[in-house]
Each structure stands twice: as C-alpha cells, then as structure tokens.
Image (cartoon, grey):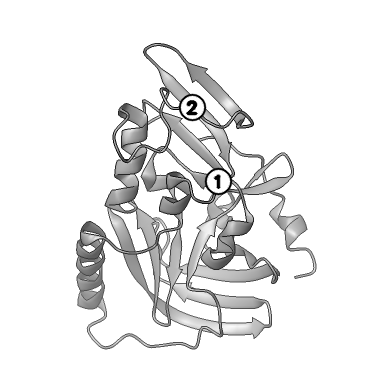
Amino acid sequence: MKKLIYILILFSACKSPEKKVVTTAKEAKPIDTVYIEKDTTKDYYHTVYVEKDRSAKHYKALLDFKYDHDDSIAYNAGYKVLKVRYPKPLKKYNIAGLPKEWLPLYLYKGSYYLYSPCNAANIGMRVLTDSTLTYYSMEGPEPKPILNFKKLNANKYALKSLPIYQFVKSSNITIYIIDPEKMIAVWDDKNLPEPYRYQLYVAKENAGNFDMVVNQSVNPKLPEYQFDKINFKALLKGK
C-alpha cells in the first residue's frame, strides 16, 4: 500500500494491461526512452527505464500524497496506537518553514532521480508536521510523534522522534539542506547503522526538477534496482 491507487498502478503494470497501467510490454514508449535494464520475452517482462514525462501516471502517482480511504484507515489506526502511549495532546513544534512532504532521491551516472519501485513498500516518502513524522510502508502511513525539534541554523535542523525501525529506541535525525534552491536535503539518523543512516530527499514542491527511474516487472518481489552509492560524507563536508 503506499496508497492503494499507487499499488494498483504498480501491480497492474506488472501483471496486465488494465486501465491504470502506466506501461506494459504491449505499450509503446517514446523512441528516445532510456532503458537502464530491459529483459522481455513472450512470458516475462522486466524493465528499468527513465521517465521524463511529468504527466505520466507513475510520475503523478508518486507525487500524490493525498490519503485515499485505505490510507486514512491505516493512518487513523496508527494514530490510535500512538495515543495509547501518548494520551496527552502531542507537543507542537515550530518546524521553521521546512517543507511538509519529502521524496527520496537516488544517484545514477552522476545525476539525481526520483524512483518508482515495483514494490510499493519501498517508496520511502515522509511527511513532517508540527507534531509528527509519518513514514510509509506496505501497511500504509505510520505516524510517529516528534519528541524534540530545533532549528540549528538556516539550513540545518535537529529532530527526535519514535523510530520506524524496531531495533532502535528513537530516531535522532539531523536534516541538512544541501541545496536550498532545489530543496535537496540529507536526512541523517545517527541512531541507525551506517547502511541505513543517510537518505537523500527532495521536497515534493521541487520534485519536478528531476526525472524518474521506473522499475517494472511481472514479479514485484524482485530486488529493487541498485543505484550508484552516494558519498554522503562528501555532501556534508563543512555542513
């Protein structure tokens, strides 16, 4: 589920040419489509390609943060669980003008891209409010209370919240705005092991500056595409 509509788009694209399909083996793509991987036969279909069309269904679906019926149910259920632990009104923080909605960015051949995974559980979007940080998983949006928030300088913020991962007690996140014009940020959770610690994000309002890599397969359980490694320490040098 990131959102039910998004999952239906992904799964229909993997299985059959339904109305909500973005691209299937039977559909023609523009001649200049850039394929990163392409493995198609009569009975099998798997492609990874660059989507440049901002009006494409995959592109529009990834940028759609609106809750549908199932998302609302998941969020409300998660919020009820949260309120069992925190029955009092959640403390509100001044998030100092930070954008609310964020999408991951990935590196491919020296450029950053949005990513539409075949498995919707791997979308990785986040939503920040004055009292919660909401993660997305296959179960839907999961709100976590913000435990502390500080603006350290014009482009650096410190945020503590309950974690999405169960193997740590809390998240200790520093948000570094490394490109204020394009609103690109490194989220650094110092409580996580090195492989999970860093993630590059872009604010939804600025996501249109980037093309999208789309991963499609008849098997949604295939490993996700492995992008180039980002040198986060170089990005954060001097920050």
Image quadrant assignment for residue 141: bottom left
* Relative depth, front residue between 194 and 89: 89
For this rendering, which residue is in front, 75 or 32? 32
Query: Label 2 is placed on what type of residue?
Result: Ala
Q: Report whether 166 appears left or right of 84.
A: right
The residue that label 2 is drawn on is 28
Q: Is residue 131 left or right of residue 193?
A: left
Mark 1 Cα shell of 10 Å, populated few (<14), some (14-19), many (≥20): few
Name the residue located 61 percent from the left edge and 29 percent from the top edge: 36
97 to 1, vertically: above or below: below
What separation in Å lies between label 2 and label 1 (alpha carbons)? Answer: 14 Å
For disc 2, the neighbor class at 10 Å (few under 14, some 14 to 19, many from 20) is few
> Could you say whether the residue bearing mark 2 is in a helix, strand or loop?
loop
Q: Are circles 2 and 1 on residues that touch, CB within 8 Å?
A: no
Q: Of the residues shown, which amino acid type is indicated by label 1?
A: Asp
Q: Position of residue 88 (x, y in %)?
A: 25, 88
Count the labels in the image: 2
Residue appearing at x 32%, y 41% in the figure: 20
Q: Residue 128 location in percent, x, y?
A: 45, 73
Q: Which mark is residue 119?
A: none
